[in-house]
Image: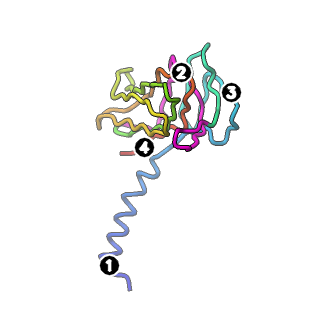
């Protein structure tokens, strides 16, 4: 026999998990073969990617970290990669990105609002797979994310829009 208190607690837990899971959307190149050169501008699941023209072409590749972990993603021009978030990305939502850089690379990741002002930023300089989590003020919307720097050797494995 199921106790009413246990059933109520289970239903409450499930109801609080469902919106967060439904609100998470990720873009990646898992279905794209390594060696594929991406265009300077492309879309995946509502995310718009714009790589700086005339430099390192965004190329899908598998990069192995110092600890042996492999990340499938695409390289980006050190002068900038701009990722515009999907319309479903609303105020207070976070951005989670999975990056792997070469040992000498340093990349600055900036979250911008609709006016182009920096909400938060982080310097990434790891040769292991690293999850960058950008958390805006609760009332602000991250409209885009800009990656600057590096040597064009690292890869971006995924970009996700995540409910708080």
Q: Report, in whole angstroms, how far the alpha carbon at label 3 lies from the one at label 2.
A: 17 Å
Quarter of the image where the C terminus is located: top left
Q: Is residue 40 magenta?
A: no
**What is the CA distance from the residue labelled 4 to the residue labelled 1?**
33 Å
First in residue order: circle 4 vs circle 3: 3
Identify the residue at image location x=50%, y=44%. 25
Dot 1, how many residues are within 10 Å of its Cα: few (below 14), some (14-19), or many (20+)? Answer: few
Q: What residue did someone put label 4 on? A: 162
N-terminal-most mark, 4 or 1: 1
Q: Are marks 4 and 3 in contact (CB under 8 Å)?
A: no
How far apart are the two marked residues, 2 and 4, measured between alpha carbons?
28 Å
The crowd level at tag 3 (other Cα within 10 Å; few <14, some 14-19, many 20+) is: some
Please tell me which residue is depicted at 35% across the width and 74% down the height of the picture.
7
Q: In 3D space, how far apart are the residues under numbered discs 3 and 1 (Cα atoms)?
A: 57 Å
Looking at the picture, how far across and down is residue 84, in whole percent?
Answer: 49, 28
Coloring scheme used: rainbow
Mark 4, mark 3: which one is toward the viewer?
A: 3
Residue position for label 3:
37
Give the SS element for disc 3. Answer: loop
Does residue 27 appear to the left or right of 24 in the view shown?
right
Q: Which residue is mark 2?
A: 151
How many angstroms separate mark 4 from mark 3 (CA)?
28 Å
Structural distance between the alpha carbons of marks 1 and 2:
59 Å
How many residues crowd mark 4 within 10 Å: few (<14), some (14–19), many (20+)?
many
**Disc assigned to residue 56:** none
């Amino acid at each position: 026999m199921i106790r009413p208190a246990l059933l109520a607690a289970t239903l409450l837990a499930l109801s609080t998990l469902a919106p967060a899971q439904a609100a998470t959307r990720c873009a990646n190149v898992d279905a794209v073969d390594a060696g594929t050169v991406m265009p300077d501008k492309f879309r995946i699941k509502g995310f718009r990617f714009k790589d700086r023209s005339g430099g390192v072409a965004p190329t899908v590749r598998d990069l192995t970290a110092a600890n042996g972990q492999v990340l499938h993603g695409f390289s980006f021009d050190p002068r900038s990669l701009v990722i515009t978030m999907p319309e479903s990305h609303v105020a207070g939502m976070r951005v989670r990105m999975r990056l792997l850089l070469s040992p000498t690379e340093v990349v600055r990741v900036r979250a911008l609002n609709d006016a182009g002002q920096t909400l938060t930023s982080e310097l990434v300089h790891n040769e292991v797979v690293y999850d960058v989590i950008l958390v805006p003020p609760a009332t602000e919307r991250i409209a885009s994310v800009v990656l600057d720097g590096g040597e064009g050797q690292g890869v971006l494995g995924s970009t996700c829009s995540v409910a708080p």
